Image: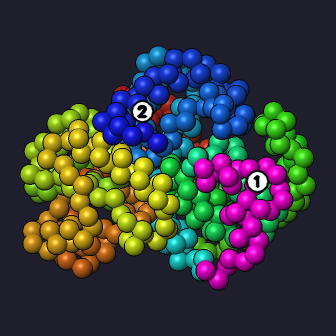
Amino acid sequence: MPTNTDHIYKNANEDLGRFLGDPINSYDHLRNFDFGPDNRRNVSCLSKYISHRVLLEYDIITQTLALHSHDHVEKFIQEVFWRVYWKGWLEHRPTVWDDFVSFDFDNASNSNYQNAIKGKTGIRCFDSWVNELRDRNYLHNHARMWFASIWIFTLGLPWQLGARFFMHHLLDGDAAANTLGWRWVAGVQTAGKHYLARSSNIARYTDGIFGDDKLNEEAEPCFDNTEHTIVPIDSAGGMTQKFNTLVVFDTDLHLESESIYADYENVFVICLNNDERNILLSNTVLAFKRVLITNFVARCQNARLCDPANITEIASTIEGLDVVYPFVGDNLDYLKRLQSSTSVTLHIRKRAEDLHCWQYAKKGFFNFKKQIPDIIETLGL
């Protein structure tokens, strides 16, 4: 993990620049290969920055298209937009998150679960990925799919336990992408359509490193008949300012410029402790978030890290707070509790780009994907 907090933003942009220089040229045909934790040149490895919006999805797309034609980098563009799509899909169905965090985690764990999280299942590829996840706080996207499939269909464990395990350890953990990705593998995101890890596929895309494990390759998809009503998305206050105090969460640390929030008297940046979270995070993940926040504070005028307890005290004494929207997840749940306990008025700032894209996120990604060229043109990316 970087130790010099003044250089996180610089490092993120340098990593993006390096990827856009040459590796992106082979991304389309090499991205599904997991060559191991010491060879990641075939993927961008930018997710830990994108999930906190140190790098904004739309800026990445703009920079990419400034250097390459859309046809040449279409697959990478689509992968960036997947993150926007997942967020929008969950914004339309917030009860999916509510169901996930209300799952009875304690009573669902058993000896299989303990062996799984300790990397002692005897499934060589899976145990290796557990150790990589715990040691490096990252897994290749293809490995995440294999991992989830083995967890659910070979080990017979609830997807919710796996989604929690990922969120606990991943530096790029994202409430929407993680929750919905696990649901998709299980077969409940798109009803009846699940993802089964196959030894032959693992052997091919790990270049023979793995692929000798016996897996359940005939499992039926999981079943969930819960109905989640699609709700309209409130455009809120756009990105306008109403009050003199702004609250920012670790889920959106984007700064178009160092002076964008300069008109606020105070900018309070919050990183929830585990006692405020439904899904507990590892010390490593929390420490990484604080490094990112420290960098944000150094770049943003009048900004400082603020403990949730202090925000509660502040909110009890002022008329209202502006808030950079933190998306469905633990941060938004905290905001709802804050408003309920203090009656403070919250003026939510939502990005116009998000609102535009989310209107196409009510159905599957195929429908969203068809809109990408028009989205790029409309947003001027």
Left or right of 365, for residue 205 = right
Q: Residue at x 87, y 59 (%)?
A: 216
Q: Residue at x 71, y 26 (%)?
A: 29
Q: Quadrant of the C terminus?
A: top left
Residue type at the position of mark 2: Ala
Residue 27 found in image quarter: top right
Stretch in magenta: 106-135
- In front: 67, or 223? 67
Q: Residue at x 76, y 53 (%)?
A: 126
Q: Position of residue 274 (x, y in %)?
A: 42, 68
Q: Residues within 10 Å of mark 2 (few under 14, many from 20)?
A: some
Residue type at the position of mark 1: Phe
Quickly name the residue at label 2: 12
Q: CA distance from mark 1 to mark 2?
A: 30 Å
Residue situated furthest bottom in the rendering: 107
Residue 142 in view, yes or no: yes
Left or right of 280, for residue 164 = right
Quickly name the residue at label 1: 126
